[in-house]
Amino acid sequence: MVWFQIGTWNGTTGFTVKDILLENALRSGLSAITGGKEFSLIMLVPEEHLTLQPVWNLIISAPWLDAIIGGTEETAFTGSIMEVLSDQNKKISRITVLESDDDLVQLINSVFTVVEGGTAEIGDIRIKGVDIRKAIILQSEQGVH
């Protein structure tokens, strides 16, 4: 079964995938840290282990982040995000910064357009050979500088 919808989904697993508090904290936290810079991708992917509360991998990408990937600036940047999300950080297991030309970023951006303030939940979908079991896309835009 493939599903894609805007809004809240409560599946047969018994937990709500969409966490509005976490989404709002991410949006305001990222905006505060970056001074409102745009992202080409902001996506939450649940970790595979089962817990009472979902634990997420935050995946972000933007061309202006490409220069810091793999260095101490990336560590400082992701640390700043975790610090700003201190009330929510038990829900974020890790932060992955992907280069703007990464295949996954390009794939998601080519299929989904989710502008700032929107949300798309996807699951059980295969896009160009990539299986996505579950994800919440908070932003997905091509052409972000």
Image (tube, grey):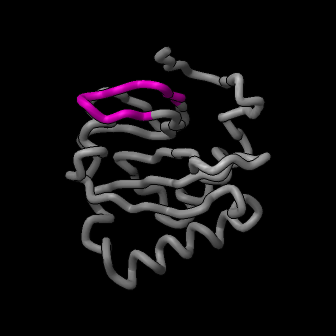
Can residue 27 be seen?
no
Query: Which of the 4 image quadrants contains residue 87?
Result: bottom right
Rendered position, 143 above or below 121? below
Inspect the magenta stretch and tell me whether residue 125 lies in it: yes
Q: Residue at x 54, y 19 (%)?
A: 5
Can residue 21 be seen?
yes
Q: Residue at x 39, y 85 (%)?
A: 72
In-image side of 115 versus 85 (left or right): left
Q: Which span is picked out in magenta?
A: 120-132
Outermost residue to the bottom:
72
Query: Which of the 4 image quadrants contains residue 79?
Result: bottom right
Rendered position, 23 above or below 60? above
Q: Residue at x 53, y 57 (%)?
A: 31
In-image side of 71 versus 57 (left or right): left
Q: Residue at x 54, y 29 (%)?
A: 121
Task: Give coordinates of residue 1: x percent, y percent.
Answer: 49, 14
